[in-house]
Image (cartoon, rainbow, N blue to C red):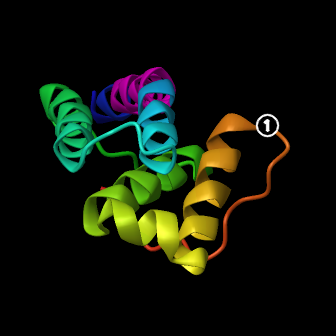
Amino acid sequence: MINAYISETNVSLSRFISDKVPQLLALADGLLAYRLSTEELENGIWDLMEGWLSLGQPKTATPSDKERVFWDLLGMMHRHAPYQLRGHMALRQQLTSRMDFLRLPSAPLPANLSTPAL
């Protein structure tokens, strides 16, 4: 019974991450291109979090690399002001490396993932 629940949770979280990657990347692209206000960015971040909460806060036993990068990118955009992510070269590089990983199948896993899986 517990194994079935864990398996179902892993599938629903994996599906959630896959479904929400385009939305997260659109937020990051909009941030870097100055197309989003800080309020629009925060609303988008909270929209993603509310979607996760609506699943009952699923947690995988061992998060995938994709899941870890997803949460790390989301956390970066929440923790840092847009001007910091655009202007600070190290932060911008970290942001774009996470975006590349989620966007490109051949991209390497970003270094220094700071956001633990939820």
The residue carrying pointer 1 sits among few (fewer than 14), some (14 to 19) or many (20 or more) residues within 10 Å by Cα, namely few
From what the image shows, is residue 2 above or below residue 16? below
- The image position of residue 93, as x and y in percent, is 64, 68
- The image position of residue 83, as x and y in percent, is 37, 66
Identify the residue under disc 1: 105
- The image position of residue 58, as x and y in percent, is 26, 38
Left or right: 98 in relation to 52:
right
What residue appears at the point 71 percent right and 59 percent down from the top-left corner? 109
Q: Amino acid at mark 1?
A: Pro
Q: Quadrant of residue 43?
A: top left
Q: What is the magenta range? A: 7-21
What residue appears at the point 31 percent right and 69 percent down from the top-left corner? 80
Whether residue 63 is visible, yes or no, is no
Residue nearest the observer in this picture, 77 or 64: 77
Q: Of all residues shown, which one is farthest toward the right?
A: 106
Whether residue 71 is visible, yes or no, is yes
Left or right: 83 in relation to 1:
right
Q: Quadrant of residue 55?
A: top left
Question: Is 66 contained in the magenta span?
Answer: no
